[in-house]
Image (tube, grey):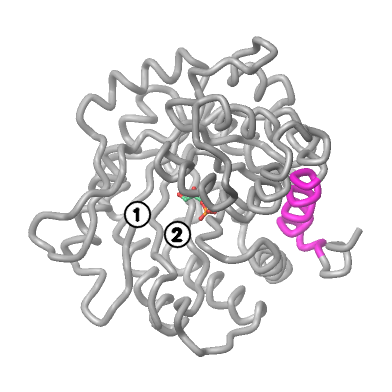
Amino acid sequence: MSELNKIALQILSNGKGILAADESTSTMTKRLDTVKVPSNEKNRLLFRQTLFSSSAMKNCIGGVILYDETIRQKTSFGKNIPDLISSSGSITGIKVDTGAKMLAGSNEEKITEGLDGLRERLKDYYKLGARFTKWRGVYSISEKYPSNLSISANANALARYAALVQESGMVPIIEPEVLMEGDHSAKDCFNKTSEVIKKCYDELELHNVDLKGTILKPNMILPGKDSNEKVSNEEIAELTLECLKKNVPSSVPGIAFLSGGQTEVEATANLNQINIKNDTNFIMTYSYGRALQQSALKFWSKDINNIIGTQEIFDHRAKMCTLASQGKWSENLEKS
Ligand code: 13P
């Protein structure tokens, strides 16, 4: 087993998932604004160190994705953040893209940037303790989008990123996110997501990326936020599994979904159904940002010094997600 494959399996095995706490400062500021907490370095650290010190870290969270600011911080009790994460047996990850900018040649689409100087930045992150990384490509659905240009340009960037990350001894998370915004049907999401994922694997192969040492972070197959279509958790699971079975090579060890704007319970219920129906060899787990943090953030904002109370909320959410990644979740456990 290669070292990278070992790291990927350590992050994803035994029902564990990933805490995506890699919001850029501007995204974190938006999140903090909604709960009326000032977004400064101290508060961003306090919320994050509260989560990273919780008991769920040992039982549920196999890896944490950080943002550049956080990987360099020390907790208020003097510990480096990567050391805090590894003290519970979890692995430190880092977002290495520098965000999505307008794609030249297409009026309304985006391309993710961050390849320039990436090799050197990766060396630095490795020294700081990171063993896996994330890069997110974004695609929106409408009649003419995503265009072939955006599908192809983002897949190329993801593959170049993944090859550099493996060269530096870390596991790349490949995140092509087809957004929920819009009134498209679940079938549209299925078709576009299939095209996007297929192109990513064509490029990854071309760039000689060892798929056993990667993790895929896709969206689930859902109707658009503004669509009136009613789709059950079972149907979402079936469409999602069909899309992944058709387009993801079997050497990929695991798939960790993003939550993408689903509520906490929706993201949990859908993951649970995916695992009940999972007839593949892929591990299917979570790499949630909002669907792990939302309730904890809301609670914390009422009293930012209530560490224990905030951790209880986070522990519950992580436990529900970990049950879902084994197909063992049910709605009545939410009340426990
Ligand atoms: P959400 O789960 O909030 O979609 O965030 C996951 C993520 O990492 C997006 O890049």
Give me the residue at 61% from left, 42% from top: 19
The quadrant the C terminus occupies is: bottom right
Q: Residue 8: give x, y in percent of width and height.
A: 57, 37
- Callout 1: 10 Å neighbours few (<14), some, many (20+)? many
The quadrant in which residue 99 appears is: top left
2 and 1 marks in contact (CB < 8 Å)? yes
Horizontal relation, residue 262 to residue 112: left or right: right
Q: Which residue carries the number 2 mark?
A: 248
Q: Which of 278 and 80 is in front in this view?
A: 80
Q: Which of 207 and 271 is in front in this view?
A: 271
Task: Name the amino acid type tagged 1.
Answer: Tyr
The stretch in magenta equals 313-329
Horizontal relation, residue 215 to residue 98: left or right: right
Q: Residue 201 carries which label?
A: 1
Q: Residue 58: give x, y in percent of width and height.
A: 77, 32
Task: Name the amino acid type tagged 2.
Answer: Val
Above or below: residue 267 compared with residue 126: below
Please tell me whether residue 328 belongs to the stretch shown in magenta: yes
